Image (cartoon, helix red, strand yellow):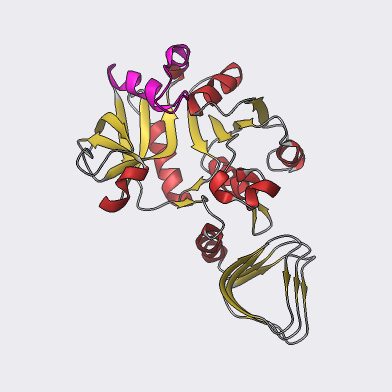
Amino acid sequence: MQGIILAAGRGSRLRPLSDRYSKGMVPIMGQPFMAWIMADMLAAGVDAFVLVIRPDDDACQTYFSQDERFRGKVDFAVQTEPRGSGDALRRAAPFVQGDVVISACDNLVDAAALQDYLRRWQGRMGELGLLALMPQKRELLSRSGVVVWDGARVTEIIEKPSLDEAPSDIISLPLYCLAHDFLAELDEIPLSPRGELEIQEPIRRLMAREPGVYGHLFARRFTLTAPEDLLTIGQHLLDRAGQPNFVAPSAQVGEGAVLTTGVILEADCQVGPGAFLQNVVVLPGGEVPAGARLQDKVIF
């Protein structure tokens, strides 16, 4: 099974991090964020990937061409202009050989839940798609695509509705299993009100066909949309690893510095003598002054 990772977005809300890294390449616990997503996919049965990237993302091509987990398993498709997820899928289409799982590069779900999701898809009875769904707080519904879902079949996605227009409190995550048939729908995507080609339109067309598109409920997800999201993501990854902190081999910790819990020190960062850190992420090259007392901070 192939995975398509949509990684060409500019990540404007991630600035200033996105001035330094493409969104999926932001490091957390020693590797790019989307490497965690892809490693979980590998463990769940995905055996090849298409990464849709920006033309200038040399760091992404280098990393995934050299990392032994992914070497020889990744094709790169280039999206020259940020024209939406539907356009990104058009770029990936020449590399697609069968059914796919599609993920944004900034959306991580629990590894066990992902395995259940892909297991259900691989055992399906002809369904054209399986969408990843999640309950959402009502006041946040206007930020997402909200679905019409009867507990089995999904019949509509309404993008960023007002509270009055929202048909449910269930949102569609940027994680989709789609049958190879979706490729035939990509050529007819109309421009959205934002002037982009969106993935939701070909999915709607699959919904209108039999046997339709279904939903699979997730309890939570971790998304990287702002620098402070690294705190929650980092704690989740530390919990997964069963360790209180992560210190890269090249990180330097000064004498008397205290790392309590939830501390992630990336490559070549420095923590000054006597500093006190709790729930802090220090990105590559970041510096914590001597004697500083930091809590719930991202340093870069």
Q: Is residue 93 above or below residue 28?
A: above
x then y, percent, for residue 42: 57, 41
Task: Tell me: residue 289, above or below residue 110.
Answer: below
> Residue 274's x, y, as percent?
72, 86
- Tell me what residue is drawn at x 45 percent, y 45 percent: 114
**Residue 126 can be seen, yes or no:** no
The image quadrant where one finds the C terminus is bottom right
209 magenta-colored = yes
Q: Position of residue 109 (x, y in %)?
A: 46, 49
State left or right for residue 76 relative to residue 140. Answer: right
Residue range highlighted in magenta: 183-211
**Residue at the image point whose x is 41% and y is 16% from the top:** 190
Q: Residue at x 53, y 22 (%)?
A: 87
Residue 12 falls left or right of residue 179: right
Is residue 130 visible in the rendered structure shown here? Answer: yes
| On screen, residue 240 above or below 8 | below
